[in-house]
């Protein structure tokens, strides 16, 4: 089961209580205070790991409690600190603090790298024992501190898939068939709309040293940006992709206006997030093996080219045109990677260039 949004509760450990104690030794009738401090409560951390790809586990385990610090003891013995608790989540998880009163969200962290770790609830500080309060005027203090309570929060976890390529299109455009052909992913495939109800990830391997991750999200419909159909529940998974592949069903069994189909998806991307519509795009006219009226295809290609985009003719079933498309995708991804590295090098050199 794929789950990309859950609420969890985290309870850090309370600090241990300070100890009230005095020395009791033979021949020392008035021993001084020797009460130790309480231990600190355990804190809770969330860490990103590549070994997870869904938040489903949290549906069955929504609460997390770290252990409290032990109380202080006599002979100036400090209580043991509570154990830290580490919660593993998939790479691409956003963490929000959710208000109990209003339900509003405040972003705490965005975990985009393997091993990235963030503190979400700090353990309470241990209380001081009476030995801490001894002064020249008060040799036998009876004052101690109770430990501070650990922090507790209601958190919302949202998963945004991290992929190089995102495949978009109307329902039944052939997205799942394509990802099944080019990768080892095996999504459910059938000839009716909304067969795909969850995102699918696959790895495309062009050669030993050339590969990229592709994400297939459920089909979009008009009004998806406002939650219609499967809506923005899955549109957010496209936000981390580098390149978008727009799949259009051009088969004769589809009686839609192909230009309208294309414009519908482009409009939904723009309305949901303008940055999505500005991502590098490739367009693929899919199911050409089932196309009889080529005038519809030419009309689509003319429209796409007028927007400065390239339209590739492919068949996810027969494999026709797919290798050329994959090579072009790799070129686009490599260009983006090179541009990013160049910009990083320029940023690193900038302080040196301005240091006269």
Image: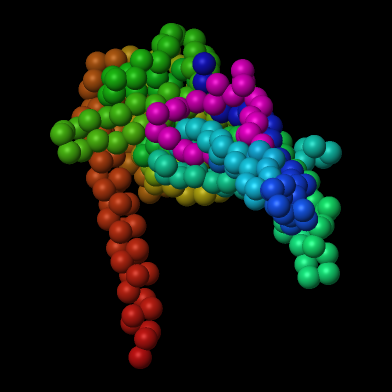
Q: Left or right: where does residue 81 sit relative to residue 195?
A: right
What residue is at 77 percent from the left and 41 percent from the top? 99
Q: Nearer the viewer, residue 322 or 36?
A: 36
Residue in front for this viewpoint, 227 or 104: 104
The C terminus appears in which quarter of the rendering? Answer: bottom left
Question: Closest to the observer: 198 or 85?
Answer: 85
Q: Residue at 75% x, 50% y: name it.
A: 22
Q: Residue at x 20, y 38 (%)?
A: 210
**Does residue 2 appear anywhere in the picture?**
yes
**Magenta span contains residue 65:** yes
Nearer to us in this view, 49 or 18: 18
Percent of width and height locating residue 81? 60, 42
Question: Does 250 appear above or below 114?
Answer: above
The residue at the point 58 percent across, 46 percent down is: 119
Rendered image quadrant of residue 104: top right
Left or right of 340? Residue 196 is right
> Is 226 drawn above or below residue 3 in the view shown?
below
- Where on the picture, by quarter, is residue 318? top left
Residue 115 location in percent, x, y? 42, 42
Residue 313 drawn in magenta: no
Q: Which segment is the magenta one?
A: 46-68
* Residue 231, image x, y percentages: 61, 28
Left or right: where 335 falls relative to 222: left
Q: Position of residue 169 (x, y in %)?
A: 47, 28
- Furthest-bottom residue in this view: 356
In the rendered image, the residue lying farthest to the left is 208
Question: Can you say whether 144 is above or below 62 in the image?
Answer: below
Q: How is this picture coloured?
A: rainbow
């Amino acid at each position: 089961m794929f789950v990309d949004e859950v609420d969890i509760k985290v309870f850090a450990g309370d600090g241990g209580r300070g100890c009230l104690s005095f020395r009791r030794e033979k021949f020392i009738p008035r021993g001084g205070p020797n009460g130790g401090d309480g231990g600190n409560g355990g804190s809770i951390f969330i860490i990103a790991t590549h070994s997870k790809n869904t938040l489903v586990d949290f549906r069955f385990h929504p609460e997390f409690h770290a252990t409290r610090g032990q109380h202080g003891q006599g002979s100036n013995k400090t209580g043991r600190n509570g154990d830290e608790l580490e919660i593993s989540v998939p790479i691409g998880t956003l963490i929000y603090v959710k208000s109990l009163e209003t339900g509003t969200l405040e972003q705490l962290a965005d975990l985009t790298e393997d091993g990235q770790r963030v503190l979400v609830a700090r353990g309470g500080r241990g209380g001081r024992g009476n030995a801490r309060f001894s002064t020249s005027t008060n040799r036998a203090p009876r004052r101690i501190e109770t430990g501070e309570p650990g922090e507790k929060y209601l958190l919302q976890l949202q998963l945004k898939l991290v992929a190089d390529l995102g495949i978009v299109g109307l329902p039944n455009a052939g997205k799942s068939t394509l990802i099944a052909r080019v990768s080892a992913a095996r999504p459910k495939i059938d000839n009716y709309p909304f067969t795909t109800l969850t995102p699918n990830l696959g790895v495309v391997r062009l050669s030993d040293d050339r590969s990229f991750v592709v994400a297939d999200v459920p089909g979009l419909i008009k009004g998806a940006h406002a939650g219609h159909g499967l809506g923005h529940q899955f549109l957010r998974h496209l936000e981390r992709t580098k390149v978008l592949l727009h799949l259009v069903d051009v088969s004769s069994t589809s009686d839609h206006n192909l230009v309208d189909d294309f414009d519908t998806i482009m409009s939904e991307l723009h309305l949901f997030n303008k940055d999505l519509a500005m991502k590098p795009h490739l367009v693929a006219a899919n199911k050409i093996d089932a196309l009889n009226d080529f005038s519809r295809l030419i009309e689509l290609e003319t429209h796409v080219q007028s927007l400065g985009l390239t339209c590739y003719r492919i068949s996810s079933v027969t494999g026709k045109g797919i290798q050329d498309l994959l090579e072009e995708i790799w070129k686009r991804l490599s260009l983006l990677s090179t541009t990013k590295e160049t910009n990083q090098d320029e940023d690193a050199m900038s302080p040196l260039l301005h240091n006269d």
